[in-house]
Amino acid sequence: MSGERLIYLPLGGAGEIGMNCYVYGYGKPGKERLIVVDLGVTFPDMDSTPGVDLIFADIAWLAENRDRIEAVFITHAHEDHVGAVGHLFSRIGAEIHARRFTAAIARMKLEDAGIGPEHVHTAEPWPAQVEAGPFKVGFAPISHSIPESSALIIDSPAGRIVHTGDFKTDETPLVGEPFDRDFWRGIGDGGVQALVCDSTNVFSPKPGRSEASLGPAIEALVAAAPHRVVATTFASNVARVKTLAEAGHRAGRSICLMGRAMRRMIEAALDTGVLTDFPKTISPEEAEAIPREHVMLLVTGSQGERRAASAALSRGKYLGIELGEGDLFLFSSKTIPGNERSVGRIMNNFSEMGVDVVDDDDGAYHVSGHANRPDLREMHELVRPAMVVPMHGEHRHLRAHVALAEEGGRPAALAPNGTMLDLGGNAPKVAGHVEAGRTYLDGAVQIGAMDGVVRDRIRLALNGHVLVTLIVEEGGEALGDPWCDTKGLPETGRSRAPLVDVLEEDLSQFVNRAGRRTLQDDDRLEGELTKIVRKTALDEIGRKPEVTVVISRLS
Amino acid sequence: MSGERLIYLPLGGAGEIGMNCYVYGYGKPGKERLIVVDLGVTFPDMDSTPGVDLIFADIAWLAENRDRIEAVFITHAHEDHVGAVGHLFSRIGAEIHARRFTAAIARMKLEDAGIGPEHVHTAEPWPAQVEAGPFKVGFAPISHSIPESSALIIDSPAGRIVHTGDFKTDETPLVGEPFDRDFWRGIGDGGVQALVCDSTNVFSPKPGRSEASLGPAIEALVAAAPHRVVATTFASNVARVKTLAEAGHRAGRSICLMGRAMRRMIEAALDTGVLTDFPKTISPEEAEAIPREHVMLLVTGSQGERRAASAALSRGKYLGIELGEGDLFLFSSKTIPGNERSVGRIMNNFSEMGVDVVDDDDGAYHVSGHANRPDLREMHELVRPAMVVPMHGEHRHLRAHVALAEEGGRPAALAPNGTMLDLGGNAPKVAGHVEAGRTYLDGAVQIGAMDGVVRDRIRLALNGHVLVTLIVEEGGEALGDPWCDTKGLPETGRSRAPLVDVLEEDLSQFVNRAGRRTLQDDDRLEGELTKIVRKTALDEIGRKPEVTVVISRLS
């Protein structure tokens, strides 16, 4: 094949569950023509990314090589796969391909970012294929929890890749196409070079359960509830929203959707025709007007998000609706690690209102959208690839998935973000490394995770802040005393005197004794004043704050 | 009884799992003589308490009534029950009573705070009683996960209270006394007015499992491990440390304890004679020197704490020990909600080192130290109190526990922190409310949760900070231009010019146009400059930062 090669390069999603972004390339080394699979986001948290609005993969490498990018393919419309298209499109500059429903969501994202929706092209499902340079890419329906979720079948001159996207092996997923064992066996019969495979649930030892298994339990719960019923799940889990709505409808209740993301997602699913038989919904005003035992609200905020409908309802009246004694609130969801405190806060608020909270402790009201360990093994066996490349997982998931593939006798590679693999030959081979990282959407600005902006915020939060101002006259004499202002620090410490007074006293003593040489040397003066503030604060309040020194020189 | 009453007042622990602090009183209203049960801590998190070191109950009410306090009783030596004794002793001023092992830990806490250990008195277990004003208090052994854990049997002129402390119904707890059904039935025979009862596991539907059930599985795991084995659990879970050490010992390994808290806890348990047959331990140096398949390390940091041994080992070499390919790391613990991200980070670090991480997903390597729902029901039935008062739980736990008691035909009350109950009569009655809250240990200073210090830190972290300085001459003219300094903000925004330049430009324009009236009015000037910074920042970077304005007036 005269030095051409087939490469795989994850830029996001291989090292975390979120912000998926994978690159495939074919061609001479360094000149491969590229396609991008998914442009997703992940969500910030107070621990590591305070103040940040959204996180996506650092695509600097793609931006540098944008003339080599043939196209972008989006597997499905979950935020961790499509959420960044609007934010990153202009740096990638290649057209976007997705199936009808996903394309509708992607177009909304582009329009939100002021970009023309015509850059998104609707693809037909397999056996249709989209040509993209050396690649032919087909969208193969696969079961997940959102309409038209697809694996990608990527044909290249060096063989076929199956990129699973998110999937489970559900023959009755309610929304989206059923998992079709014969189809995947057939793909396997045709020969597959590499299976690039979802790893999310590699630690779940039992076979996954079908979405269809939930309906009866939820219906029974709703039917037995004496008053209002409210249920929350991910807005983008269209399958679950449908399961909940149908269970409520069968239990004789009118359905009301609350929260923009949920209404938008369901409207898009109805508009594109991928969601049918969805019960008629009523508005919050109508829901408030009818007896509460006839209502079921489906609301956003299953992860405890502060601004979503669940949190708003837990704080009091929201859109005219106020929950109370005897109402039932169902979390039909799994709490994502890290969100337990926010979810717990909402549960306790509801408890204070007298609302009965039911969650998924025993699995009766939630099933995962991802393939469990035995399901992954089955997928390997159906597709029978020459090699397996685990993706969509933290490092430990990828590692366990590599071991699972190897147990099955298939070579596999642990390739975290930034690891370029050569997928030719009999086993994946590391072909190089590129800089991979995270980009933060921070207000209106995209900043790099390593820029230090967020690090400074974390330091302010952990240490508090002291500001010192000093005016120095033209001749090099201090004009008046140094002045301090604190933020996020106790007002008094060990000496019981105001902290600001103690700091100013110590700073004044230093300034009064300091020679002209020191006072004329900005760096040295700043360094000395900072040192004094930190030492005095440590003595007084037992911590070293962040310090900013502003020296104004009159001239 | 001529207007005397028996009261219960939780100040901490009834509304959270942590910072336990309960008050009982007997006497004329407002003049009750008081005893305090437990003085515990809870731990800060970045979401709500960045920079804080430790959290305990706000005991302002106790401090105001310190002349009424007869004594303090500590049920057991877990941090959420004993952790605050050193920090709060001087404001309470009453002597502390605890059983031998708990007393040893409490004395260490007092000494850490520079307070004489003689204020802690060693109590003998039931049937011994400590007299404290109108109360007689006995320490009744009950199974938990630490030596000498005790329920309190509190006799008052208005009847007997059983305060369970933390407990489970374990007949083979390995450490501490077995749960004794006959004993508790006997107590019930004697008549109990109120059962004040642990609620932690009210949502766990199955009977709890015994500590003794873990040994064989852990031993098998250790025996099968080819290389080094490291296990972590709460240092204060002495039962588990013993289970792990014995399993390792039986599997032919030498045991090494790492982490100050764990060494200190085990030493105290050995010194006080409550822990016997603990395998001989070796030092980290010795552990490094012998073949790694002969070593088992027991380490602190099961909750992902940054400074503990687990986190240190996950970052690289620690005390000469470096984990690697083929080593096994066992989390013999439950991750407390809110700690999932930190624990996940450690697991992924180990994954990158090639260490196999095993956790408690399926319950094989961890059991809870608290009574599950059926166990709570059993306790109600053994003790047969006139009323039940759930404690040690979040609001939702207390609420569910009240419902459980009522299902059993017993009156119960939901009394969150600050709710004073009258425990006389046939059912608990709300007798009043006192201010309850949290105190933060922040460096060397105790601050109130509502003081605004932490709120300011959170705002700095979420919004970043702009500092503006302006010098105004005696005559009321600005001297030079306003000067800006930013922290935690992007350097450039929409205009691509440095943010600081854009801010200074807008501020200068304002100052140049401002009349003398404005320039001479500090409040107005500060308000206007702040407004400009926030508006310009919103335009440029899409967020409104915190602003500090310093106006220096020359005179």
Image (cartoon, coloured by chain):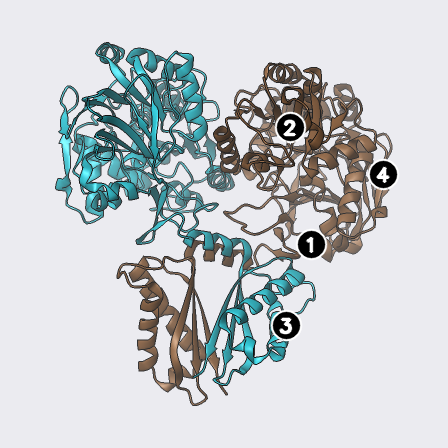
Chain colours: A brown, B cyan
How far apart marks 3 and 2 lie (CA) works out to 52 Å
Disc number lying in front (1 or 2): 2
Q: Residue at x 48, y 52 (%)?
A: B458
Q: Position of residue B14 (x, y in %)?
A: 37, 31
Closest to the observer: B178 or A407? Answer: B178
Q: Chain of mark 1?
A: A
Residue corresponding to mark 4: A122
Q: Nearer the viewer, residue B275 or A112?
A: A112
Nearer to us in this view, A115 or B28: B28
Q: Residue at x 43, y 90 (%)?
A: A475
Image height of B14 relative to B89, above or below:
above
Residue A450 can be seen, yes or no: yes
| Mark in the foreground, 3 or 1 | 3
Q: Which residue is mark 1?
A: A61
Q: Secondary structure at mark 1?
A: helix
User: Separation of disc 3 and disc 4 at Cα?
Assistant: 47 Å
Marks 3/4 in contact by CB < 8 Å: the verdict is no
Dot 4 crowding, Cα within 10 Å, few <14, some 14–19, many 20+: some
- Report the amino acid beneath label 2: His
In the displayed structure, does residue A515 sit left or right of residue A69? left
Query: What residue is shown with label 3?
Result: B506
Is disc 3 in the same subunit as disc 1?
Answer: no
Q: Is residue B513 left or right of residue A74?
A: left
Disc 3 and disc 2 on one polypeptide chain: no
